[in-house]
Structure formats: structure tokens, C-alpha cells
Amino acid sequence: MKDLGLFAERDPARAERIMRSLERYAERRERFINALDLAALDRATAVGILRDDETINETLAFATSYLDHLFALDAQQTDSS
């Protein structure tokens, strides 16, 4: 799975846009995969799908904490200015 750059910069607005886009992608992907007959796929393809699902889920789980952190840093920098 390609790197979406969610954690590449300390820009809360950019990270939030990427996270929202990944959430929409994950929802569409889940609907598509639910329509597939996974048993009809070869093992490597099925494993790849499951691996990508895990990567997406981990990224989204961490993204929420990361966004909280970025917004806190942004607020802290604003307060100290």
C-alpha cells in the first residue's frame, strides 16, 4: 500500500484532510471487498487484501492521536506567541 504522507509534515489541517480522505477510501474499499468472493481469490491476493486492511486500520487508529497531538502543539505555539 502506498504511503499517503499523513505523518510527513506537522501540519494539522493537511493531516486532517488526508485522514478524512483515507476514512472515505476505507469505507468505499470495505463495501467493495464485502462484495467480493474472497474464497475465489488466490491465497496471495486474499492475504494482500487483509494486510492492506490492517495497515489502513492501524493508520486511522494512530491518525486520531496524531491529529490531537498536532492540534495541541498548534494551540501551544499560538498561546506562546
Image (cartoon, rainbow, N blue to C red):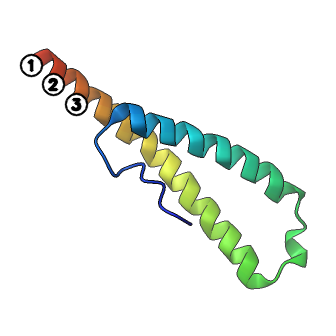
Q: Residue at x 49, y 46 (%)?
A: 61
Three-letter code, disc 2: Gln
- Image quarter of residue 46: bottom right
Q: Residue at label 1?
A: 80
Q: Are marks 3 and 2 in contact (CB under 8 Å)?
A: yes
- The dot on residue 72 is none
* Quarter that holds the C terminus: top left
Q: CA distance from mark 3 to mark 2?
A: 6 Å
Helix, strand or loop for disc 2: helix
Three-letter code, disc 1: Ser
Question: Could you say where residue 49 lies in the image, as x and y percent from the top left?
Answer: 70, 68
Q: Residue at x 90, y 77 (%)?
A: 40
Helix, strand or loop for disc 3: helix
Three-letter code, disc 3: Leu
Q: Residue at x 58, y 41 (%)?
A: 21
Q: Residue at label 2?
A: 77
Whether 23 is drawn above or below 35: the answer is above
62 relative to 10 in the view: left or right: right
Q: Residue at label 3?
A: 73
Question: Could you say where residue 8 lies in the image, as x and y percent from the top left?
Answer: 34, 52
14 relative to 58 in the view: left or right: left
- Image quarter of residue 53: bottom right
Q: Nearer the viewer, residue 32 or 14?
A: 14
